[in-house]
Image (cartoon, grey):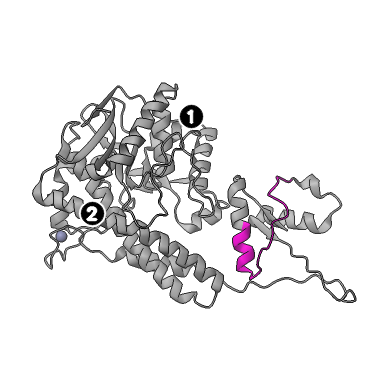
Amino acid sequence: MSWIKTTDMKSAINLAKFFINKSEFNIQKVLQVPIIVNKEDFDNKDIELKMFHHANEYNIAFYYIAIAINQNIPQKEVQLQPSYKSNLSDTIAIQKELSNQGRCLHYQANNQCNEIIKAHSLQKKGILQKIARKGKIYSLSSSLGNITKNNGKITLKETGINKFSIFKGFCKKHDNELFSPIDNYDLDINNSEQFFLYSYRALSKEVFHKQNALNLYKQELEKRRDSQVLSSFISNNLKGIKIGYNSLIHHKNIYDNILNTKNYTDIRYISFNSTQPLSLAFSSVLYPQYDFFGNLLQDLSNNTIKFDLFSFSSAPTKEGWSFIFSWHKSSDKSCFKFIKSIQGMLYQGHNLNDILFRFVIKSCENIAFSPIFWELLTPIEQDEVSNVITSINNPFTDTIDDYLQKDLTGISKWVFSKVNSSFIL
Ligand SMILES: [Zn+2]
């Protein structure tokens, strides 16, 4: 029997299965699907009540009942000892070390690239300073210390912009040269080079992080060889990251080639333009799996294909800001369907601001919130944002097909006055 403290029923069973396997038991049959329970359900049931309180405090509790074939063995309660002790601080240390190993991802990188800077994936001077208050923004409490403090819930905390989203993926020379058109100038919604550069930066950052993740998982796997359950859990993750990484490199090569020829005609882009002040800074890439209606766009478990990819970012403009998507024409198939589904949602009466806000919160970990925006939300709205982020980042939750259909309605208060694109839908 297991008790799990969660707001997400779907992940509860995955979580329970993982821990039961980790204790080296094999599940033959699940007799009872998860049900919601309250303290009152365990009146006069001492053991169950004890487990309920345990789960309330530590999020999870298990009670195994073993039935002996020999009936004469007296009943006895024992505390099972975990066969594996996780060492999270070790893992975090390796993660830090890997992300500190700077390298230049520029296509012309050579041994001159020794001056690695803490290149910012979101340009520090431009976009972050536009939303910061006294040099600070709100971002996800991604460090494990904070998550443990908050009972597994990801919350937002005030962070200095110098600490936000640092990645050492370009040397100083290449970073300055390459990104000057977007670091030093507002976005012009007809300038394909700028759209390309927003994409290129987001893509490079993803390549950098995935290379680190691959190294991290490889090291973890070596250490966990003794536990069959953990090593198979890690090697499954590793396999997934490798599949995604192969497609990333495929796109990086295409983008490097464009950079080399400076011909941006194969880059598609669309911008949703607002005259409001910028409230969120974000930039990322995605293999779109489902559209807004839950239709499958591409099968991300198929390792024989190269996945379609788009990037999305917020970009400051002269008038305010733009929510931008862009991709290379080789990704047209999924990306056009995805953008068309935004149109479909609008026909059905959904608001553009809800659609885009929901999308970015559910798709991107790398978000900086302007303190003014965040503090103007009611505690209920802030809580909803935190809950959605926590559930989407839960490794035991599977992506459900219509995850972009609902949640976070009426929160962003964004207003878009104009749409501009390089194509006709
Ligand atoms: Zn370089």
- In the image, what residue type sits under mark 1? Thr
- Of all residues shown, which one is farthest toward the left? 261
Label 2 Cα crowd, 10 Å radius (few <14 / some 14-19 / many 20+): some
- Of all residues shown, which one is farthest toward the bottom? 226
Residue behind mark 1: 409
Residue 135 locus on image (x, y percent) = 32, 44
Picture layout, residue 117 above or below residue 419: below
- In the image, what residue type sits under mark 2? Lys
Q: Quadrant of residue 113?
A: bottom left
Residue occupying the point 38% across, 31% down:
341
Q: Is residue 135 left or right of residue 421?
A: right
Residue behind mark 2: 252
| Ligand number 1: quarter of image | bottom left
Q: Give the residues in magenta.
A: 16-37
Residue 235 locus on image (x, y percent) = 45, 67
- Location of the C terminus by quadrant is top left
- In the image, 31 versus 110, the foreground residue is 31
Query: How far, Cα to Cα, is label 1 from label 2?
Result: 35 Å
Q: Quadrant of residue 417?
A: top left
